[in-house]
Structure formats: C-alpha cells, structure tokens
Amino acid sequence: MSTSPLLSSSPAPTEPGHGGHGHAHGGHNLTGMVIFLLSESVIFLAFFAGYAVLKSSSPVWLPEGVEGLEVREPLVNTVILVSSSFVAYFAERALRRHNLWAFRALWGLTMAMGAYFVFGQAVEWAGLPFSLQSGIYGGSFYLLTGFHGLHVITGVLLMALMLFRSFLPGNYNNGDAGVTMVSLFWHFVDVIWIILFVLIYVWQRS
Amino acid sequence: MASSSGLPFDPRVLKAPHPVPGAPDNWKRFFSFNTDAKVIGIQYIVTSLFFLLVGGLLAMIMRGELITPPADLVDPSVYNGLYTMHGTVMLFLFLFPILNGFNNLLIPPMIGAPDMAFPRLNAVAFWLVPVFGVILMSSFLIPGGPSASGWWAYPPVSLQNPLGHFINGQFLWILAVALSGVSSIMGAVNFCTTILRMRAPGMSFFRMPIFCWTALAAQTIQLVGLPVLTGGALMLLFDLSFGTSFFRPEGGGDPMLYQHFFWFYSHPAVYVMVLPVFGIFSELFPVYARKPLFGYEVVAIASFGITVLSLIVWVHHMFYSGTPQWMRNLFMVTTMLIAVPTGIKVFAWIATLWRGRLRLSTPMLFCLGGLVNFIFAGITGVMLATVPIDIHVGNTYFVVGHFHYVIFNTITFGVFAGVYHWFPKFTGRMYYEGLGKLHFALTFVGSALNFLPMHWAGLMGMPRRVASYDPEFALANVLASLGAFLVGVASIPFILNMVSSWARGPRAPANPWQAIGLEWLLPSPPPAENFEGDIPTVISGPYGYGLDRPLVENEAHYIARAQED
Amino acid sequence: MTTSSPRRFPIAGLFLIAGAVALDAWAGVAVARLSQHWLPVQASSAAPLVDGLFALESGIGTFIFLGCCSVILWTLLFNRAPKYDLRNGDPIEGNLRLEVTWTLIPLVLVMAIAWHTIQVNRTLATLGGKLRTTGGHDHGAELVAQLPAGRSEPLAPVGPIDVIARQWSWEFDYPNGVRSTELHLPVNRQAEFRLISLDVLHGFYVPAFRLKQDIIPGSEITYRLTPTREGRYRLRDSQFSGGYFSTNQTDVVVESEQDYRSWLREAALLPLQEAPNPADSLYQRRQERGDRGWAVVPPAPPPRVNVSADPAALHDA
C-alpha cells in the first residue's frame, strides 16, 4: 500500500484497471491541490478583511503602551521566506532534469529557510510587549501570524516527506506530482505572507 | 471461480474493501474504511437519515412545548438547547452529508468514471461525519448542556458560558462545525476534480447530466464560502476560550463583524443545499414525464448564475441589525435578482411536464410536491428580500415558515425523491410503491399544516426561538404542532420501506424506470468500478426522450451487459 | 374545420387561457385585499407603507402561484400516461422565445418591485446614526427621519427616551427623569429613542408599528418613529438573547398628548421600586427546584422604576 494517502500518484495495488493511469492521477492531484489552495486562500482573505475592518472602524486599535511593530527583523524574515520560493523553484527544475542530489540539496535549503522563518517568528513573538488577549490588536496579530505560521510548519513537514520519498527507488516513475503540489503550497504560503506583511507591518498608521 | 474451500467463490474476496462481482453481499464493508464511492455514498446517506431522526425527535419535543403558550414542557434553558441542536443537527448532520452521499453515488456513474478522483480522501471525508456527530451529541451529556445560542451562535450570547468551564457546549459545537467544514472542503475538492477531469469520452460539459452541473455549482460555493465561516468560527472560539475580543464590545470588538463572517457563508450554504435538489428535480421530471428537460443548456447555466449571485446577498439577514440604508437597498436588489435564474428552473420544470406522459410514482410525487412548495417558498422569499417587510417579519415565525418551506418542503422532498428513484439502482432491490405513496401523502399534508400557519403567526408578530408566547398565537401553534406530529408519523412508512425493501424487496432490473443516462446502462447494483474499463463514448446530449437518438456508441452492447448480471 | 397546417391555435383555447388569466388576476387582487387581515392593527406612520408593499407582493405572488399550479394541475389531469404505457411525451427540448420571455419578465418584475421599494425606503428612513460609546467616535450620522408627505409636525420630537435592554427586561428612561418598564408615547408625534444594551444583542420590535431594530452592546443607536393610533401594543425582544428571552416583552401605550403629559407628571412623583420581572421569578423558581436544567445566565437585577408595566393588561396587537 502506498504511504501518503493524499499525495500518492502511484496506483493502489488492490484497485484493478489503474495500471496505466499514473499520469492521469498526477493530473488529478495537481487539479485538486490548485482547487484546495484557491479555497484556502479565501480563509486568509476573510481574516485580512476582518483585520482591515477592525483596524479602520475601531476607535481604539493599539493596546496601552504599544506604539507599533518593529519592521526590520520581520523584513529580513520576509526576504528569506520569499527567496526560499525561488530556491524551491530551482529544486524542482533539478528534479525534472533527474538531478536527484541537486534536488535534495536545494530542497533541503528551502526547508532550512522555512524553518528559519518560523524560528524568527517565534523570537519576534517572545519579544512583543502585548499578548493574544491585548484587545482586538493582540488577537488579530497573533491569530493571523499564528495561522500563517502553522501553514509554514505544515509546508516544511510536507517538504520533509518529499525529501524522504526522494530516497525511495523508483519513486518518480509516475511523475513528480507530489513535489509539484508541495511546491505550489509553498509558493501559496509565501504570497500570503507578502500580503500579511504589507497589512500588518507596512500599514501601521491609520 | 471454484476454489479448494469448496465455495463457489474465492473466500478472500470477503475481505475486499469494495464489493466484488460474484462475492456474496458483504455488509461489513459499510462499517469499514472503504474507498469505493458507492459504499461511501450509502454510508453518508444512512448516517444522515439516522441524524434526520435525531433532529426530528428534537423537533417533536419543541413542538410539544409550543403547542401551549407557556413554557410548561421543558425549562426555557432546555428549549434553547433543543432548538439550537435541532437546527445544527439538521443542517450539518443530515442535509450536508446526505447531499454528499448523493454526489458519491451519482457523479461517477453519471459521467462514466470508475470512482472519485481521490478515493481515500473521500473515505476520510465521510468518517469525519460520525466523529463530529459524536462530538456534537456528546454536548448533551456534559454539565451545562449543549450550545444554546442558536445555530447562528451570535456573540455575545454565545460567549457567555455561564458555568465557566473550558469544555462547554458552545466549545464542542464550534469544534464539530469546524470539522464539518474540513469534511465538506475535502468533499468539494474531490467532487470538482472528478467532474472536471474524469468525464467519459464524448461527454462535453453540455452533454453532462444536470445533476453534475448543479453539484459542481454547489461545491464551488462550498469552496468559496466555507473558509469564511471557518475563519469566523475560529475567531469565535478564540473569544470563547482564549480571552480574545474580536466580538466582545467591552474589549473593543464588534458583534456585527461576526454576523458578516457568518452570513457570508451561511447564505450561500442554503444554495449548496438547494442546488443539488434542483438537480434531482431536473433529472427526475424528464424520466417521469418521458420528455426532454426543457431548456437544458439554460437551466445548466442558471445554476452558475445562482452560484455567483448567492455570494452577494448575505446582508439580507442583517437588514434590521443596523446596516446603512445604501447597503440594505443594494442587497435587496441582489437578493431579488436571484429569483430570475431560480424562476428559469421552475418554468423549465413546468414546461417539461407540459405535454409529457406523466407517471405518478413516488419519486415523481415528491418532485411535484417539492415544486409546488418551492414556488410558494420563493414568493415568501421575495417578500423577505423587500426591506420594509423584512423589518417587520424578520426574526419572527414568518422566517421560520419560509425557510422550513425551502429546507423541508422543497429540499427534503427532493432528497426523498432521489432516495426512491435511485434506490433500485444502488441496492439492487425495488421499494414498495404503496408505502412510498403513503409516506408522500402524510408528509405533504403534515408539512403544509406544520409550516403554513407559521407565516401567519409571524405576520402577527410572534418572534422566533421563543419557548413561550402570547395567547393570540395559540391557534397557529396548535395547527403547526399537529402538522409536525404528522410529519413525525410519516417517517414510519419510510423507514419500514427502506429496511424491508433492501432486505427482501424484489430484485430490481438495470433500468426499472426506462430512463436515459449512463447510470442506467449499469447493472443494479453497479460493480466495483462501474464500467470497469469498458467506458462508453457519449454521442449525444442527455434526456433524449422521444428523440430516437442513442446516448452512447454501441448502446445495445451496454444494455445487454447490464442485464447479464 | 379542416386544415393542413401543422399547428393551429384553437380560438376556444385562447378564450380559456384569457379566462384563466383573468380569474387568476382577480384572485391576486382578492388576496391583496385580504392580506390586511393577516397583519396587526396599523399603529405607526410606517405601517400603511409596509402593509401596502405586503399587499402588492401577496397579490403578485398569488397570481404567480395559482398560475403555475394551474398549469401543473392541467398536466396532472390531461397528460397522465395510462398504467403500462411507456411511450414518450412530446420531444420538445426548448423554445428560445419562451425562455427569453420567462427570463425577462421576472427580471423586469423584481427590478420594478425593488425600485418601488427603494422609494418606500426613502420615506421610511427612521434610522439615526449608530454611535459607538467607547471613545465617542461618531460613526457617520444617517439621514434623519422623514415623515410621510402630507403630515405636518408642529411639535418637537418626544425624547430622547433611553431604551435600556437587559437580560431580560426593558427599561425606558425619560428626559425628565421618569423611569418606567412600560413605554408611553403621545399619538401623532415623532418619538426619538436611544437604544442601549447593557449585555448582549436584543431586538426592539413592535409588531403594531411594523418596526424593528436590533440593539447592539457597545453602540448607542438613535431611532425614531411616529405612533398614529392610540392603544396598548406589545413590544417584544426579537433578537435571541439567551435564557428567558421569550419573557422579555412589555407594552407600548400610545395615548393622547394630554394623557401622556399627565402620565409623565404623575410618574415623576412615584417612588422608585423594583419592577416585577417574569424572567427573575422563573429563575427564582428554578433555583428553588434545585437549579435543574441546562446552563443559563442569571438574569440582570430587575430595573428600579417609577412605573411598572401591568402584566394583566390586555394589548390590542
């Protein structure tokens, strides 16, 4: 039986008649992932809308004693995260050229950059003068960045799974839809972060 | 296939995860993690029908309370929990799952696919249903009881948590609804991918059965709308359990923000429920009138018109909340616009009946009853879209009457019609027609008696969600309660019919209704992979009644093959 | 009559259809007139406008409903297949002209209703600005109440009367300091309210006035209306507010200018007393019986008022 039920592009042995359908399944997987990402982006859009509405209509926005957010460190994190998308793209290119070791190196680098982002976020959180309960500002900040952070962690874990699978012999006989899907997810996470960054860190004044 | 064990089949097939031709009927597969869409479809449907009875039982207690003006049957706090759970169970544990069940049963055969695009994801999506069902039902047993803030869960009431426990009814409710959302999104990704990518050769979009059109339209709404509800529910959960203040005024939050999040999904949600039933009506009227569906292409496109419009009407639930005048006018206009694509479908069905040759079997009776009820419900819907009228009757029993006319008298009628119509195909047995007609008669009369008087009570000013009311509303409530009890009684012939027919009804042929469609070119029940590699090529549009055109190439071969079993 | 043309319109059929349409139209008008009986008495300046819209839509709705049902009934009577007859019906797949017609007519109809209603809305505008109390941020005052054309307004609006909603009681605080759990208003004079909730969402709803406005905690809502008929009318909490929400009801007494002023004067002389409150008594009873039932928020203390509503008084609507 295949390992990951959701990302498998190889046919299950007990399902007859699926022998030659590996590529069709890869296509299904990609379509499914695109549809899923479109839907997932809506939850972020809803949070963005809620954030914007609360920020613009509330008489009191920032909690007592808080003047705003430090932008420099998060900007560094942002650059690292967005660059990791390019690294992932090169990793995919290497895989398509069947250069497995280049793929693994670049893919691992992407994971490291993603992990650094999460680490950086945790450090930022630890140093903030307000908490989740600090009014609508605290709630919105931690909910948005936390929800996004969860997606980054999920992305890193999925990438680890892909990395592990790259060591299985014959894993790419039916295409590399799994890697493409995770790459897509990763790019999605990055785009969401760019919007989040602009909303929370850039748009700080009324 | 003889084996050494002496049985006429290889005993290892008994452990197969899906039905295998030649093996005896293997009931255990319905209780296992089975990836066959037909098994999953039946799992969804039976689970949903169980919860229909649970929700119905809650309704019986509620109507027992409401048959007299004072709150004398149960404590008001209990009544609040009952009506909350009635709505929640009916929507999330009956309607959404049963429609997913229909999707599973019908979509693959109708488009000539062997299964869904993601069979394991499909099974996971189903098994989430009993999980969140148990979570939701368990809230009846915890101290403080279940959620009692209505199925809308508006803050600040939903945040009050009188007993102060971390695990409380509202918490479990939010958890269950969130899991329901996850299950639905999984289903939506699956259904959309399947319809987009796995149609038989020759089946262009405009040769696809209308049920698949409406399923695609409905699942698109799920994908766009559900995440917003999930977002709102998450924020509510954080307010309830982790001390945030998104919706708490004392913390600077805004209760109205929740309403926008909630209704942005929950209005389109009703179209998620009604569109598949429109699809069922569109499938069944041609069969039982033996006429093509009138204006098939227009009806198909109207489904997506409804999808688009449904996403821009949500504020009509908030006309009396304090929305500015320009917003109320705008959303009144968009809400009234939905009457147009919906009207197109209604007129198309009536035109399908016209000069047909009608057979009044049970499925057709439910379709006709549902159609008549829907015309009425649509009219009261336009009244509710009219802002000044809504300001008077909003949050009264007029609304309760209206939406039950849609949800029960239309949608559930359509669900029953679909169950009866496709019962022979997927169980291989015929149901008893007499019991079916009895079920229809009792349900039609009961539901009319139940929900018509509510409109009157609402016009006179009876608020909804009340456990007690002023004496002038007594007559309307007595009539409604009698109707409700009749509807409850009507479930008896239905259950009897379903159980005994499946167990020992007469064997059904491949095409008992002489209908045109790919699913009718399969045996009853269809084998594990439906067409099993020998997928027909579609050469004409659907509903070719009287047009003397074969649906697929080499049709006679498939008809003969279906009857072989 | 012999003819070789494939399709003839029988004159008799046309008459039948014309007759049916006329009958349908008559039924629509009849229902529009009847609809008034399904509504409470009209006690505010808004009521006739609301009822007029309802009559219009009931009439049109009846016409559509009966029209569709007659066609369906016709097919049930004349298009039934005999028992074992599996022949097909007429193989009609569509008719573009018909489809365009039944798209355009409903479109025009609903847009006409919407346009008409927008005009009615303008006349009805009774909503004042929604103001937030935390920080006094003015959220943009709305168009202030207009009286229907033809009605002159000699006196200034009554009020502002503070309408205080709690779980589960109503309190009305008048500008001269009088507090009451029964709302008294002079007839034919605009009244201004400040809708305030001390805890959760509530709904200010008087069916006889045809008016409803949710009360939002954390905001103060200015609201205006004009009662036009003397009498005693129910005021009901319309937005579910938990627990004993169904008991959160009181009366609005609309009286002549003189009676109103004398009531106001006499009320000011009465001592402040706790008003009897059904939610409170139900809760006490529940406590006496061992607090059985599901979780419920203890009711807010009953308001201390000069005048309490008379629970035994009969209301007109």
Image (tube, helix red, strand yellow):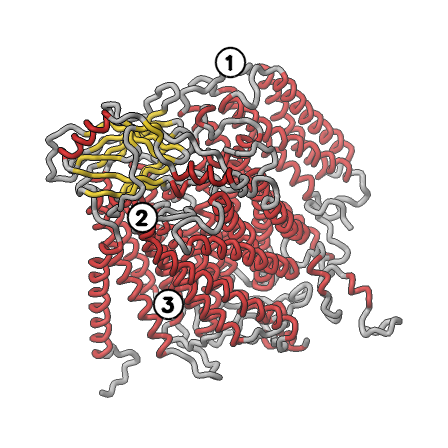
User: Residue B99 location in percent, x, y?
Assistant: 54, 56
Quick one: C284 or C200, which is closer to the camera? C284
Front position among marks 2 and 1: 2
Residue C204 appears in which quarter of the rendering? Answer: top left
Q: Amino acid at mark 2?
A: Gly
The answer to whether residue C71 is left or right of residue B487 is left
Q: From what the image shows, is residue B260 above or below residue B491?
A: above
The answer to whether residue C258 is left or right of residue B352 is left
Q: Residue furthest bottom?
A: C2
Instruction: Label 3: state its secondary structure.
Output: helix
- Which residue has dot 3 on it? B350
Q: Are marks 2 and 3 on the same chain?
A: yes
Is residue C222 visible to the viewer in this orientation of the structure?
no
Q: From what the image shows, is residue C174 above or below residue B141?
A: above
Q: Amino acid at mark 3?
A: Ile
- Which residue has dot 2 on it? B461
Q: Earlier in the sequence, mark 2 or mark 3?
A: 3
Q: From what the image shows, is residue A25 above or below residue B227?
A: below
Q: Are marks 1 and 3 in contact (CB under 8 Å)?
A: no
The answer to whether residue C117 is left or right of residue B551 is left
- Which residue has dot 1 on it? A66
Quick one: A1 or B532, which is closer to the camera? A1
Quick one: B58 or B500, which is closer to the camera? B58
